[in-house]
Structures are given as C-alpha cells and as structure tokens.
Image: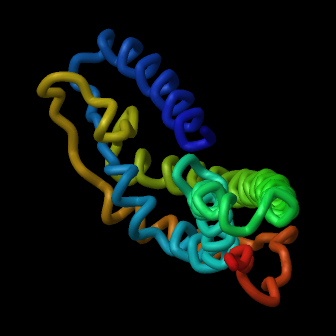
Amino acid sequence: MGKLYNSFKFGVIAMAAVIGLSVTASAQILTVDDERVEREAAAYKDFNLQTNELRQSILQRRQMVTRGGAIEQQLADLEKRKAIIGNDKYEEEKKKLEQTYVRFQQELAQLEYVFDQLRQEAMVQVERARQPVIRSLLAERDAQVIMMKRLLLGSAAGIDVTTQFIEKLDSELPNVTLNNLPKPAAEAPAEPSQQ
C-alpha cells in the first residue's frame, strides 16, 4: 500500500511538472527505474535483510491459516478419522485446531502490523535521503524533472539516471535504522500434531 501511495504521489508531482514543462519546449526529462532502485539500492537491501526473519514468520503463519493451508488440511484429516477416534476425541482435537487457527491469525495480524510500521519508518528515511539526491541530479544535468520510468507515457524521451540515482542514494543513506524491530523469535510456529 505504501509503495502504491508513494508511486501515486510521485506520479501526481511528475505529471504536474510535465504539464508545467509544456510551456518550456526545451526542458530536459530525467528518468529513474524505481523498480531497479528498490532492488539495488543499499537502503532497500538493508531493510530486506533486517526484516527477513519477520517476513518469514509472516509467511509461515499465512501458510497455516490460508484457505487450503495446513490447519484446514488437518481439520479435513480429522473429519475423515471421526468414525475411528470417536466423537469426544474428535471434538477435543477440533477445538485444539480451532484455537491454534485463532492464535495464528492473531499472531499474523500483529506481525503484519509491525512489518507495516517498520516499512513506514524506513520509507520516511528513504524519502528524506531522496530529496537531496533529486535536487543534485537536477542541478548537475540542468534538468527540470525526474520521472519514474513506469510513469512515462508513449514515447516520451528521457535520460536514464538510475545508476547515478542509486549511487547517490547509497552514499546519502547506506542503511536504514529500524527502532522497533522485534527481537528474533525463539522458533517458528509448530504445526499442531496429528494423531
């Protein structure tokens, strides 16, 4: 959601600048491949490295609670064994699986909230670092606007400055500081046992 909002915000600013450029026919447009920036810039790599364990925890819990996930499969297996294990044992195991499902859903919601907070914290730092980089590139190239490549319409020509943008962003912000990064978990969630 944050990525989409930033792209939209940048797109609106860029389009306003292009409309303003129509007055000056000789304006130079610089382009930046924002997808490449997100893959290669040090700050983004650092964020991914710092949040890797958190993302893995989110993925594990999603695999447990999604439709067709591990808990749903265990409930289906339990249903098949109902006649063999008896109604009391069936109800007991079903209740345990339902409690596990609710716990994993709650944990997933909490982890996703924490991840979104961390991403916002990192994006604030990246945005602060990007501003001087943008101003510097515009001044060096005597350009009027920098547009994201994916926002260019038709065959609008521009000079690609992605490599220089990444280099300057790396020197401005080599890593991000995540103040609310949770401590590493002791272990991944265990799947409920089947008997």
User: Residue 38's x, y, as percent?
Assistant: 45, 60
Q: Image check: 63 left or right of 40?
A: right
With respect to residue 8, does 120 lie above or below?
Answer: below
User: Which residue in the rendered view is the most extreme toward the bottom?
Assistant: 186
Q: Residue at x 26, y 34 (%)?
A: 28
With respect to residue 97, does 105 lie above or below?
Answer: above
Q: Residue at x 71, y 79 (%)?
A: 193
User: Residue 119's x, y, as percent?
Assistant: 69, 56
User: Residue 142's x, y, as percent?
Assistant: 34, 43
Which coloring applies here? rainbow
Tell me the quarter of the image containing the N terminus: top right
Question: Can residue 181 be seen by looking at this rendering?
Answer: yes
Q: Nearer the viewer, residue 161 or 41?
A: 41
Which quadrant would residue 61 be assigned to in this image? bottom right
Question: Can residue 63 be seen by looking at this rendering?
Answer: no
Q: Nearer the viewer, residue 135 or 179?
A: 179
Q: Nearer the viewer, residue 60 or 165?
A: 60
